[in-house]
Image (cartoon, grey):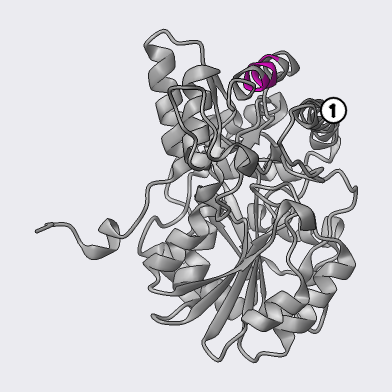
């Protein structure tokens, strides 16, 4: 009999982190592994942001911080919402957390009661469902496919709504598919949600600045639904600051207050030094992420074009983030004479061993027909990795 609490035994390990860990172990053993599994920018945090952190240390910002974040950071976030998104969130509607992951967890735990349903368009980021489980909520999946550009429709959302529906959670740009919803598509989804009283939306916008359409569209822009939207964002992707661990929400004040209360019993305020760095990032303008986005667009084109040359793969053209999510179901049931591929997880392990390339099974993201690969690495490594993948897949008959 397990001595652990049921909540932890029912919780799954993050498969993205598990694959990255396995890749590192193989590399430590001397294997030549190219990791395309983790969603982390390969850029270095801009030097002016780093200098602001050093100055914060010299200036003595080494004490406990307010739970919701320093006032100057929340003001900078408020200004960012206004200037970049045309949205009005006062500083007291903003809560800064130790990464966008904690921001999402705060909201889910503050809103979802046991037995209430959370609508989750699939594919989805791996941790959404696990957070719902922690809150004892019930995930309700709305499926899509490569043929629909991994987008769900308002009609599908409307059909998934029941009297128990409490929350809709999605990301745009999307991890893992790179899908970006247009303004019109978001408007129709907002209309569907508005039909159900007390149904709220978590809009995960962490990849906002890696958007190949151009202007980012937020579902919070529609006045008739804004008071039921919680925006989640952060500095990790847009400013290459994953290790600084800064995420934040913009939300109706009563939800922000609840998240402040929740966070106060778990971590309290996040790192003082990281907050000062994040303040500098948000005030630094668009130059860094604009150039970074151009690099990702070039890499996307490189990877998509190479993947399209592999017979059997189905590939959409992702319009944001730094992932490709090909449908690999063509290879199910095939073998190289030693290994038979039964599913996407088998294919990932085959490619790790045969090609020395690590990816993440689509099962982790709610689509068993796909794998996710990140192109947040150099052009040279991407060419080498996809070439290896093509050669390995050619062995399967």
* Of residues 256 and 58, the one drawn nearer to the viewer in this rendering: 256
Q: Does the magenta stretch include residue 385?
A: yes
Q: In this view, does 261 lie above or below 323?
A: below
* Left-right relation of 13 to 57: left
Question: Magenta part of the protein: which range?
Answer: 384-390
* Left-right relation of 147 to 34: right
Q: Is residue 12 above or below residue 132?
A: above
Residue farthest top in this picture: 30
Q: For the C terminus, which image quadrant? A: top right
- For the image, the number of numbered tags is 1
Q: For the N terminus, which image quadrant? A: bottom left
Name the residue that disc number 1 marks: 298
* Of residues 178 and 287, the one drawn nearer to the viewer in this rendering: 178
Q: Which residue is drawn at 82% across and 43% down?
A: 317
Q: Is residue 204 above or below residue 184?
A: above
Estimate the x, y position of residue 3 in percent, counting from the top left.
11, 57
Q: Is residue 258 above or below residue 291?
A: below
| Magenta span main SS | helix
Q: Does the magenta stretch include residue 290?
A: no
Estimate the x, y position of residue 203 in percent, counting from the top left.
67, 64
* Left-right relation of 99 to 19: right
On the image, which quarter does residue 357 sit in?
Answer: top right
Q: What element carries label 1?
A: helix
Q: Which residue is drawn at 70% across and 56% down?
A: 145
Q: Which residue is drawn at 84% across and 40% down?
A: 286
Residue 61 seen anywhere in this rendered image of the structure: no
* Label 1 crowd bin: few (<14), some (14–19), many (20+), radius 10 Å: few
Residue farthest left in this picture: 1
Estimate the x, y position of residue 157 in percent, counting from the top left.
69, 76
């Amino acid at each position: 009999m397990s001595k652990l609490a049921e909540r932890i035994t029912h919780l799954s390990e993050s498969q993205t982190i598990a694959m990255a860990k396995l890749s590192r172990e193989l590399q430590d053993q001397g294997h030549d592994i190219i990791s395309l599994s983790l969603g982390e920018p390969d850029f270095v945090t801009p030097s002016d942001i780093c200098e602001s952190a050093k100055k914060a240390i010299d200036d003595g910002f080494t004490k406990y911080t307010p739970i919701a974040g320093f006032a100057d950071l929340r003001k900078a976030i408020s200004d960012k919402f206004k200037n970049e998104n045309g949205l009005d969130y006062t500083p007291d509607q903003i809560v800064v957390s130790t990464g966008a992951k904690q921001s999402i967890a705060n909201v889910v735990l503050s809103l979802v009661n046991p037995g209430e349903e959370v609508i989750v368009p699939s594919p989805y980021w791996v941790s959404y469902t696990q957070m719902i489980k922690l809150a004892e909520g019930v995930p309700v999946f709305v499926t899509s496919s490569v043929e629909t550009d991994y987008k769900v429709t308002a009609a599908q959302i409307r059909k998934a709504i029941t009297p128990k529906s409490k929350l809709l959670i999605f990301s745009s740009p999307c991890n893992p598919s790179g899908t970006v919803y247009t303004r019109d598509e978001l408007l129709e989804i907002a209309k569907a949600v508005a039909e159900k009283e007390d149904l709220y939306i978590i809009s995960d916008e962490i990849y906002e600045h890696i958007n190949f359409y151009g202007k980012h569209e937020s579902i919070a822009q529609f006045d008739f639904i804004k008071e039921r939207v919680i925006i989640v964002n952060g500095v990790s992707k847009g400013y290459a600051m994953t290790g600084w661990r800064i995420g934040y929400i913009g939300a109706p004040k009563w939800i922000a207050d609840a998240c402040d209360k929740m966070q106060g019993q778990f971590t309290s305020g996040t790192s003082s030094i990281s907050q000062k760095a994040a303040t500098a990032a948000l005030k630094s303008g668009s130059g860094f992420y604009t150039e970074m986005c151009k690099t990702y667009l070039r890499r996307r084109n490189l990877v998509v074009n190479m993947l399209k040359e592999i017979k059997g793969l189905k590939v959409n053209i992702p319009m944001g983030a730094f992932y490709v999510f090909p449908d690999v179901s063509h290879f199910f049931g095939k073998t190289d004479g030693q290994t038979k591929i039964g599913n996407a997880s088998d294919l990932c392990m085959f490619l790790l061993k045969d090609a020395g390339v690590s990816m993440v099974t689509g099962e982790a993201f709610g689509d068993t027909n796909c794998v996710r690969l990140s192109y947040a690495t150099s052009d040279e490594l991407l060419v080498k990795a996809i070439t290896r993948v093509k050669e390995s897949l050619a062995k399967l008959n």
